[in-house]
Image (cartoon, helix red, strand yellow):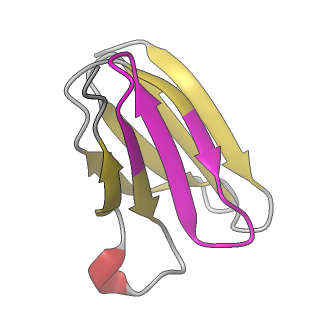
Amino acid sequence: SKDITCVANSFALKLVATSGADGHILVWHYGLGLLEGTCKGHAQDVTQLRFLEPHPLLLSSDILGNIAVWGVPPIHASQRFRCLLRIKNIL
């Protein structure tokens, strides 16, 4: 298992997101204590996580400067835990 490198929470959505050096983001429902889903898409350490309240979106960035926006509950099920926007660092 990998160490947790970032944590973000959303009181409005009742979600907590954690990330680690493996590039995966785990999204938890803190009211129920359940793992809601996993966002996979970063190849390197995730360095920042932020919920974009009041919208059901999670912003992440990695050590290479890449940025991703993820859909989280209560967004439509077809968009949950999927990368909706990716900005690649080309520098």
The furthest residue to the bottom = 76
Q: What residue is rendered at 41% in x and 59% in y?
A: 70
Q: Is residue 58 magenta?
A: yes
Q: Is residue 29 left or right of residue 87?
A: right
Q: Is residue 14 above or below residue 45?
A: below
Tell me which corner region of the image, top left, top right, bottom left or bottom right, holds residue 46. Answer: top left
Q: Quadrant of the N terminus?
A: top left
Q: Is residue 65 above or below residue 81?
A: above
Q: What residue is rendered at 80% in x and 58% in y?
A: 11
Q: What residue is rendered at 28% in x and 83% in y?
A: 78
Q: Position of residue 9 (x, y in %)?
A: 70, 46
Q: What residue is rendered at 33% in x and 16% in y?
A: 21
Number of numbered markers: 0
Q: Is residue 66 left or right of residue 53?
A: left
Q: Position of residue 32 (x, y in %)?
A: 62, 62
Q: Is residue 91 above or below residue 75?
A: above
Q: Is residue 42 left or right of residue 54?
A: left
Region in magenta: 49-68
Tell me which corner region of the image, top left, top right, bottom left or bottom right, holds residue 13. Answer: bottom right
Name the one closer to the observer, 60 or 81.
60
Tell me which corner region of the image, top left, top right, bottom left or bottom right, holds residue 23. Answer: top left
Q: Position of residue 26 (x, y in %)?
A: 41, 43
Q: Position of residue 48 (x, y in %)?
A: 55, 29
Q: Quadrant of the C terminus?
A: top left
